[in-house]
């Protein structure tokens, strides 16, 4: 069985064969994947060694100390946190071999085609259609709030394949090539002035059946794996004590004594404690992940992340007074990712407004925690057994 000592030996061998100082970045990342050191808990041949997930930290520490290049997780987070675990669980052997390596190295960026103008919180109401035509599926519809679609080659997509079934059934899950004819990506400018989100129009897009994940009509089941991993990816990132946005706020407090008040001090202390509780809870959640797939607890973490991001950024703007209202540039830009700690307070305050919407609205996540964690009665569902085509729209 692979242990920490074995992983250190394997990492040392990788570094000896591919010295970071003289090896091309992409070549190093490919070699790391092939050595099973990309995500050690994945199967052998797919970037891993069937090792405990917790041992990934051993590899990461050794590589960081050696100055090895990373794969820019902020840019490829959707692929790493959502597409990869879904492909691993539901993909065919051919799909795993084709997609996982370039996904992890960042050669191919992924996005998520789930939400629609009429199916956001009620995602199962989606109307994008996929109709079988021989060995292909022809897809027509519109998706919205799609992060990184302007950078992506591939997308994970859910579409309705049987409108005669209730809305949670008759959905199928696909991998969509965004370079194919009929795919149009348009920017959605946000309150920050940037357009990291997009709307995606699909018109007669042909997806081969070989790019279907899971069985026909089982798309909602497959999507649950994506959504649970998404919430862990958004709310459960590993950060050091006083890291992330609370670290920025604390640094502001220490640097600007002339702005301090008793009320702001008390609020900062409360936020600091809440952030530390959330950090430790995230650490426990990651330990639970070593034993299986993420569960509804990830929804609680994502809830906490959204609430804290908005409260901390609001505190910071208030503390900095007129300096908190400054903003560097309202020029329309299409960024590679979101930077919550490297920008000014005004950006953090505006961008944090989206945290309670993206990755599942806070209202929906509260329902998930209530029903699946606390065991409270579910909300009445009058549409449970009604065919999707008969639902009022």
Image (tube, grey):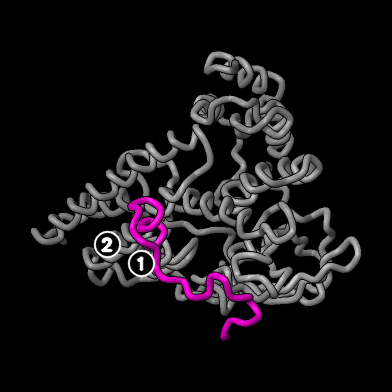
Q: Which residue is mark 2?
A: 316
Residue 206: quarter of image: bottom right
Q: Look at the numbered discs 2 and 1 and tell me whether their residues touch, using CB distance below 8 Å.
A: yes
Question: Residue 82: image x %, image y %?
Answer: 59, 51
* Label 2 crowd bin: few (<14), some (14–19), many (20+), radius 10 Å: many
Which residue lies at the image location 53% right of the left edge and 31% below the top edge? 53
**Where is 366 relative to 26, above or below?**
below
Q: Is residue 250 left or right of residue 360?
A: left
Nearest the eye: 50 or 20: 50
Nearest the eye: 320 or 262: 262
Residue 361: quarter of image: bottom left
* Label 1 crowd bin: few (<14), some (14–19), many (20+), radius 10 Å: many
Q: Secondary structure at mark 2?
A: helix
The magenta region covers 367-393
Instruction: Specify whether residue 297 is painted magenta.
Output: no
Residue lying furthest front: 385
> What is the C-alpha distance between the residues marked 2 and 1?
8 Å
Residue 277: quarter of image: top left
Q: Can you tell which mark lies on residue 288?
A: none
Q: Is residue 99 left or right of residue 373?
A: right
Q: Secondary structure at mark 1?
A: helix
Which residue lies at the image location 37% right of the left edge and 56% below the top edge? 369
Question: Residue 380: image x %, image y %?
Answer: 42, 71
- The earlier-in-sequence mark between 2 and 1 is 2
Position of the C terminus, as image quadrant, is bottom right
Question: Residue 105: image x %, image y %?
Answer: 68, 42
Instruction: Specify whether residue 389 is painted magenta.
Output: yes
Q: Which residue is mark 1?
A: 349
């Amino acid at each position: 069985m692979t242990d920490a000592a074995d992983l250190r030996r394997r990492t040392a061998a990788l570094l000896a064969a591919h010295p970071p100082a003289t090896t091309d970045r992409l070549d190093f990342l490919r070699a790391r994947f092939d050595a099973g050191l990309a995500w050690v808990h994945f199967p052998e041949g797919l970037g891993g060694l069937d090792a405990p997930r917790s041992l990934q930290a051993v590899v990461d520490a050794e590589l960081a100390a050696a100055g090895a290049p990373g794969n820019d997780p902020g840019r490829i987070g959707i692929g790493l946190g959502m597409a990869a675990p879904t492909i691993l669980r539901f993909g065919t052997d051919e799909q795993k071999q084709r997609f996982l390596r370039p996904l992890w190295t960042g050669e191919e960026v992924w996005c998520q085609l789930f939400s629609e103008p009429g199916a956001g919180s009620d995602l199962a109401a989606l109307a994008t259609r996929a109709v079988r035509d021989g060995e292909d599926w022809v897809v027509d519809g519109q998706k919205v709030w799609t992060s990184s679609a302007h950078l992506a080659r591939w997308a994970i997509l859910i579409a309705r394949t049987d409108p005669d079934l209730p809305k949670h059934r008759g959905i199928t899950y696909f991998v969509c090539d965004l370079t194919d004819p009929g795919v149009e990506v348009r920017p959605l400018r946000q309150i920050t002035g940037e357009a990291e989100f997009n709307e995606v129009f699909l018109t007669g897009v042909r997806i081969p059946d070989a790019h279907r994940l899971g069985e026909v009509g089982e798309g909602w089941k497959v999507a649950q794996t994506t959504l649970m991993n998404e919430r862990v990816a958004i709310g459960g990132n590993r950060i050091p004590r006083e890291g992330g946005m609370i670290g920025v706020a604390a640094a502001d407090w220490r640097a600007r004594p002339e702005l301090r008040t008793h009320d702001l001090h008390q609020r900062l202390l409360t936020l600091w404690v809440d952030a530390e509780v959330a950090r430790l809870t995230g650490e426990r959640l990651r330990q639970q992940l070593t034993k299986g797939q993420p569960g509804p607890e990830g929804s609680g973490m994502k809830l906490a992340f959204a609430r804290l991001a908005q409260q901390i950024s609001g505190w910071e703007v208030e503390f900095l007074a007129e300096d908190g209202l400054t903003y560097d540039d309202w020029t329309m830009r299409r960024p590679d990712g979101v930077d919550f700690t490297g920008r000014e307070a005004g950006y953090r305050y505006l961008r944090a407004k989206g945290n309670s919407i993206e990755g599942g609205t806070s209202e929906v996540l509260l329902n998930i925690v209530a029903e699946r964690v606390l065991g409270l009665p579910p909300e009445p569902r009058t549409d449970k057994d009604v065919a999707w085509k008969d639902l009022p729209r």
